[in-house]
Image: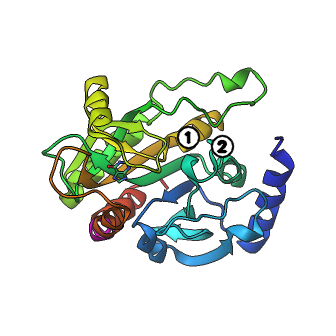
Amino acid sequence: MNAAPEIARNAALIARRAGGVKPRVGIVLGSGLGPFAEDVEDAVVLSYGELAGFPVPGVGGHAGRLLLGTVSGTPVAVLHGRAHLYESGRADAMKVPVRTLAALGCDTLVLTNAAGSLRREMGPGSVMAIADHIGLTGVSPLFGEPGDDRFVSMVDAYDPQLRARLQSTAARIGLILHEGVYAWFCGPQFETPAEIRAAAVLGADAVGMSTVPETVLARHAGLRVAALSIVTNLAAGMSDTAISHAQTLSVASAAAADMRRLLKAFLEDWPK
Ligand code: HPA
């Protein structure tokens, strides 16, 4: 699919509606982080339904709206709602939204998600910056993409400078920010305990069902990426507490306040 005309149309419509706002940072809100949308000042809101090629999210905790405005004085575009591989079987479901953010002028994408932890000391409520990922789904959002730039490097995909800035921001506000490797499973079923043991051997610190395709799309579009996980549970087989989507949402909502604080302070520290 050549999405270029849709992206250009979306960018023109958004620019018209958003008046003078020229976003620099795109932010994708994961499960439970919806309240961060309230931190967007002077928000102009578009529903995904108005935008060509944007997904209609079907998962509880995921709305479908784009907000433009400022957070801590930094102009942002917030994607409140994402599509996952397990909804359609398509890894490129976020292709048009990510490229639309790039077309609007964003040079950085901050991704957030809920994840299961493989580290006991990084329990529910912890916040982890993703340092690297392991793609375990066997698919790419760039399948079918033409051109040599599809062979995009994934070294330092999670920008080392942004990671360092996240750490100094976290220290400033007194928040422990873990760092680790995120393994991408397709879902929607949670992992088996054997899969979690395998992921641990491979070097994963956390597991989840999102984010990685958006990182690949963003790197392909030339955006810098930072990604943050809220740990909602110890991964399958590691604790007696049953894993469920309801638990994901409730723990993510409870821990969202820390993530919100971190994001606001991070954007305050943004070079103006
Ligand atoms: N596995 C996959 N995705 C998740 C988990 C998990 O344990 N917790 C929150 N999202």
* Label 1, ligand 1: CB separation under 8 Å: no
Horizontal placement of 116 versus 224: left or right? left
Q: Quadrant of residue 53?
A: bottom right
In-front residue for pair 53/272: 53
Vertical order, 156 against 102 (above or below): above
Residue occupied by mark 1: 213
Numbered circles on residues, count: 2
Q: Quadrant of the N terminus?
A: top right
Residue sitting at x 75%, y 73%: 17
Q: Secondary structure at mark 2?
A: loop
In-front residue for pair 125/186: 186
**Residue 178 circle label:** none
Which residue type carries mark 1? Answer: Pro
- Residue 223 visible? The answer is no
Tell me the magenta residue range: 253-257
**Residue 92 circle label:** 2
Residue 1 magenta-drawn? no
Cβ atoms under marks 2 and 1 closer than 8 Å: yes
Q: CA distance from mark 2 to mark 1?
A: 7 Å
Horizontal placement of 171 versus 159: left or right? left
Q: Where is residue 191 drawn, in percent x and y?
A: 35, 43
Q: Earlier in the sequence, mark 2 or mark 1?
A: 2
Q: Where is residue 32 drawn, in percent x and y?
A: 39, 67
Which residue type carries mark 2? Answer: Asp
Majority secondary structure in the magenta region: helix
Q: Secondary structure at mark 1?
A: helix
